[in-house]
Amino acid sequence: MTKIITNIQQLVNLRTESQPLRGSQLADLPCLQNAYLVLEGEEIAGYGEMKDLHGTKTVFGNEVIDAKGATVLPAWCDSHTHIVFAASREAEFVDKIKGLSYAEIANRGGGILNSAAKLNATNEDALFASAWKRLEELSRLGTGAVEIKSGYGLSVEGELKMLRVIRRLKEKSNLSIKSTFLGAHAYPLQYREHHDGYIDSIINEMLPVIGREALADYIDVFCETGFFSPEEMEKVCRAGMQWGLKPKLHVNQLNSIGGIEKGIDLGALTMDHLETVTEEDIEMLAGVKPTFSGNLWKGISTLLPSAAFFLRMPLQPARRLIDSGAAVALASDYNPGSSPSGNMNLVVALSCIQMRMLPQEAINAATLNGAYAMGLGNELGSISIGKKANLIFTKPIPSLAYFPYSFGSNLIDRVMIRGEWIS
Ligand code: NIG
Ligand code: FE
């Protein structure tokens, strides 16, 4: 079925060829004014200016959709989330208001361990149902692709249960989903003084099942003081890589302890968070030119501003990273502890308002670079012939900058995933 979308005020992020954008490339966001767009089934098949759309293209049998002056963007590609969880954690939110830090809450058994206890007591169907609702909400907010991590099981059964939930989400949803194994998210209490025992369980009990059943696309480790050291991260990643899982890592959220250097060494696809970075860390991230290796790019710096915002931390140094040449992506980190929101519109707005990213840079980082940050750059993230028709249609807006500027308004009129409207 051919669909012709007419009267698009502005068609955003048009690319004939693409690769991850770094440094000054991020500010270049190719757009077409007064445009039409042609879809064949679930893919983008063509586009052009309205003045060039002649009768032949609107022949009988094609569905014509009048965009009525909407701006059309590629749907958001959210490359870092934890949307499979059993319960919210607003009591900790109140504790933080009263003055406790994220690390203090974690140290007294709250935080990730709190989520793990609840997840292990919840069955797979219930986890699936709640994650499905979150996924539906995300698609209404304009997200068309999501990476989802395990990491709240911290036991063989719990981690496998989470990954099976993600597999069911992949099977049922129209959204493009990638799955990441984050068994190394925190040490369960019984392994607090016995790290090797838990790492052994990850390597010898979890990974073989995950590998054999192809339950994950990537491997992640929370490299942080009080969690996993760079050396422990390396051990876990190297074992995951034996099963074909490329690293996508949590580094430098609270402390700079060598995670970036190790991540680059491991050829990580992405290094995520980056709230706490030294000048040397920035140089290292800027110096790692994204290269194509083993079917995937590597060396993308993913910023999660809503996590920094929610934890009342200084936001990531996006300006310094971009100005030094880094390939920056943006993601929501949607999780119950540090970012109980998966709203990428807010992420884009925060990036412009608090991190001084230009609207063009933020949109590129949340679409094309987000797609590359989860290995989907060939099929998503820009308006390109052959890519999936995952599209945001805005309400009438005077300019693209109005979108992040008007941060409290819902400016999305409707969303299309793989050529179909979402309800
Ligand atoms: O990305 N920092 C580690 N993991 C999550 C938070 C997990 C939690 O608090 O539940 C994050 O921020
Ligand atoms: Fe995270």
Image: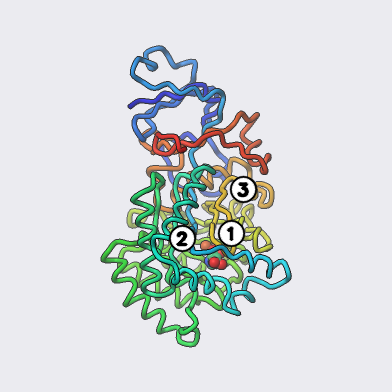
SS assignment at label 2: loop
Q: Write down which quadrant ligand 1 falls in.
A: bottom right
Q: Residues within 10 Å of mark 2 (few under 14, many from 20)?
A: many
Rendered position, 245 above or below 331: below
Q: Mark 3 vs mark 1: which is more N-terminal?
A: 1
**In x, y percent, where is residue 357?**
63, 47
The kind of residue on which mark 3 rests is Leu
Rendered position, 372 above or below 398: below
Determine which residue is flagged by label 2: 84
Query: Is 277 placed left or right of 63 in the picture?
Result: right
Q: Quadrant of residue 150?
A: bottom left
Instruction: Specify the label residue 346 is tagged with.
Output: 3
**In x, y percent, where is residue 371?**
45, 48
Q: Disc 1 beta carbon < 8 A from ligand 1?
A: yes
Q: Is residue 258 visible?
A: no
Q: Residue at x 43, y 39 (%)?
A: 417
Determine which residue is flagged by label 1: 339
**In x, y percent, where is residue 312?**
69, 62
**In x, y percent, where is residue 404?**
64, 41
